[in-house]
Amino acid sequence: MRVVIAGAGSVGRSIARELIGNGHEVLLIDNDADDVQSSRVPDASWLLADACELTALHEAGLDSCDVCVAATGDDKANLVVSLLAKTEFAVPRTVARVNNPKNEWLFDASWGVDVAVSTPRLMTALVEEAVSVGDLVRIFEFQQSQAILVEMTLPPASPWAARRVGEVPWPPDTVLTCLVREERAIAPTVDDLLEAGDELILVTSADSERDLEALLNPDSVHTEQAD
């Protein structure tokens, strides 16, 4: 897979290293000569240019890339890069970094964004996940499909603890993608038993989010009603 990353700061370079480590081809673009130093990620290709300029994206060969990642520290630049990648170069998938959570509403398909990643929101979700059992925590949204990635630590009082995955009447558009148990990730099958304390990673829709929480932890609904 060929990936073009706009923004060669610490975030962009970290993404590049991970992708290269997984066997992908990466090109980093930045207009700051201090950041464009090939020695920092020697296995990546580099381009000193403004990723918001069409000429730079042509030079980067965006029309032949599989994924464009807008990872600069400027939300306006990330939106422009995503829009150009999608509308001018028909890039199959765009991923954009959201620096200011107040700007999240802009990062959708109308700006060419397939996946928006908000670091502040992700960190908040991880903090909440660390302290909350039985609460459904939204991690991020897939803008193109309107699906969301959520997590819940299954509480002991859940009616589905010690029940098979295949027995759970999941809400519409909901898929259990991973179980994390004792620091081990498990690809769930219909015959796996759910256990109290399991971290469930699910893809669902915004419309099914509340139903999913009520299904896995009915006590959360009772608590809301009491409040």
Image (cartoon, grey):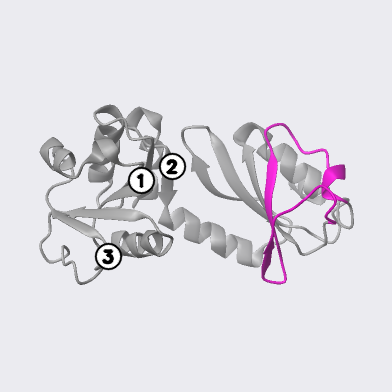
Mark in front: 3 vs 2: 3
Side (left or right) of 68 relative to 182: left
Q: Which three-letter amino acid code belongs to the residue tagged 1?
A: Ala
Q: Which three-letter amino acid code belongs to the residue tagged 3?
A: Asp
Mark on residue 43? 3
Residue at numbered disc 1: 96
Residue bounds of the magenta highlight? 164-193
Residue at numbered disc 2: 115
Kindly state the secondary structure of the residue where label 3 is placed.
loop
Tell me the distance, in whole angstroms, between the alpha carbons under discs 3 and 2.
Answer: 26 Å
Residue 138 in the image: x percent, y percent?
58, 49
Kindly state the secondary structure of the residue where label 1 is placed.
strand
Mark in front: 3 vs 1: 3
Q: Residue at x 46, y 36 (%)?
A: 143
User: Could you tell which of marks 3 and 1 lies nearer the N-terminus?
Assistant: 3
Count the marks. 3
Residue 87 in the image: x percent, y percent?
28, 27
Mark on residue 131? none
- Asked if residue 32 is positioned above or below residue 141 in the image, the reply reads below
Q: Residue at x 12, y 66 (%)?
A: 34
Q: Residue at x 34, y 32 (%)?
A: 112
**Marks 2 & 1, CB-CB < 8 Å contact:** yes
Check residue 189 for magenta coloring: yes
Q: Which three-letter amino acid code belongs to the residue tagged 2?
A: Val
